[in-house]
Image (tube, grey):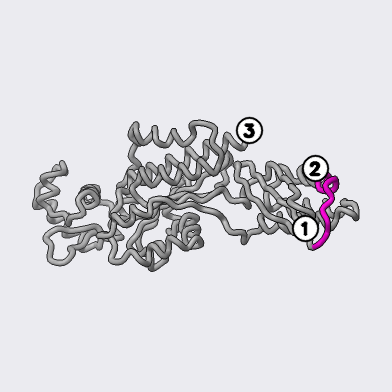
Amino acid sequence: MADDRRLKVLSAIVTDFVRTREPVGSRALVERYQLGVSPATIRNDMAALEDEGYIQQPHTSAGRVPTEKGYRLFVDEVARVKPLSAPERAAITALLTGEADLEQVVARTVRVLAQLTGQLAVVEYPSLRLTSLRHLELVALGPTRILLVIITDTGRVEQRTVIMDGDVVSLPALEHLRVRLNAALVGCRAADVVPALEALGEQAPAEERVLLRAVTGALEDALCPDAEERLVVAGTANLARSTPDFSSLGPLLDAVEEQVVLLRLLADGGAPASHAADDGMRVSIGSENRDDALAEASVVSASYTAGSDDAVAHLGVIGPTRMDYPATMASVRAVARYLTRFLAGSAHQ
């Protein structure tokens, strides 16, 4: 739809309905918005918008509400990302104050994102598969048990316990292997680790090969493409406050508990690639989520990086389709950029 005036009318209807949760009539548009046209013209525009499926009349109300198609057009053509207020900028800046590790920053990030948007917030940890190794540590936990500690350039720390199946761990051999592994693997991306380990195995002395195979298996499991990613969620209570916007919250809450569903939603937003912004932000609305449990929900997501152009993970929010899209998009984008800045600093420390 190319009619600028009708877009303004649609924008006013969306804005008013998001604010009041009440169907919007032509009189309210005349009184609250400076549209520069007569009430009769607004009524004609509303009739055209309804015929085209952008708004609808719920029940017998005289007012109209946006449809999923109307929200989509609003986001694509009308919505502009709002500048953050000073308190919002201060809240996000506080994420990076002090000496905080990745765990602390992710925990703070998801809480602040939920507070800023009033929605359910989800933050994915930087993927082990998409980051580089910074350091590996091997710690003997007993005669036959080893703790493998994996530290990436984003500051993510993962631990794996290695069982030696009866073979007694030699502390000098363990230290020697630790040095060799770090020399061979530091700076490697996950895809390069297996070839490097194979080359290391061919060069390893016979007495170290059993130990190397055990550690290699644990490391490859942690970095394999099917390895489960980690994410954190905050603001579930915000969904409860949006109960009137959903016919039933149960299926949506069940979907939130399914990590695989959330990871998919964050990764592609459920929306077509044509709805992705240049900075990786996506907005998927209702049925675009391709999951019945989210048919009445919208997902606003963005990717973040570790200082390069490649995304290492995603974050976003889930809420009702009756959402303040410009403000939500601004918060998601800003938090993603701050997290990118933090990780870029970590990667160069």
The residue that disc 3 covers is 349
- SS of the residue under disc 3: loop
Residues packed near mark 2 inside 10 Å, few (<14), some (14 to 19) or many (20 plus): some
Asked if residue 172 lies in the magenta stretch, the reply is yes
Segment colored magenta: 166-176
Judged by depth in the image, the label closer to the viewer, 1 or 3, is: 1
Residue depicted at 76% across the width and 53% down the height: 142
Question: Is residue 339 visible to us here?
Answer: yes
The one nearer the camera, 100 or 35, is: 100
Task: Point out the tag, 1 or 3, that comes first from the N-terminus.
Answer: 1
Position of residue 162 measured from the top left corner of the image (x, y, whole percent):
73, 56
Location of residue 294 (image quadrant): bottom left
- SS of the residue under disc 2: helix
* Residue type (three-letter) at the residue carrying disc 3: Gln
Question: Is residue 199 visible to us here?
Answer: no
* Residue type (three-letter) at the residue carrying disc 2: Val
The residue that disc 2 covers is 179
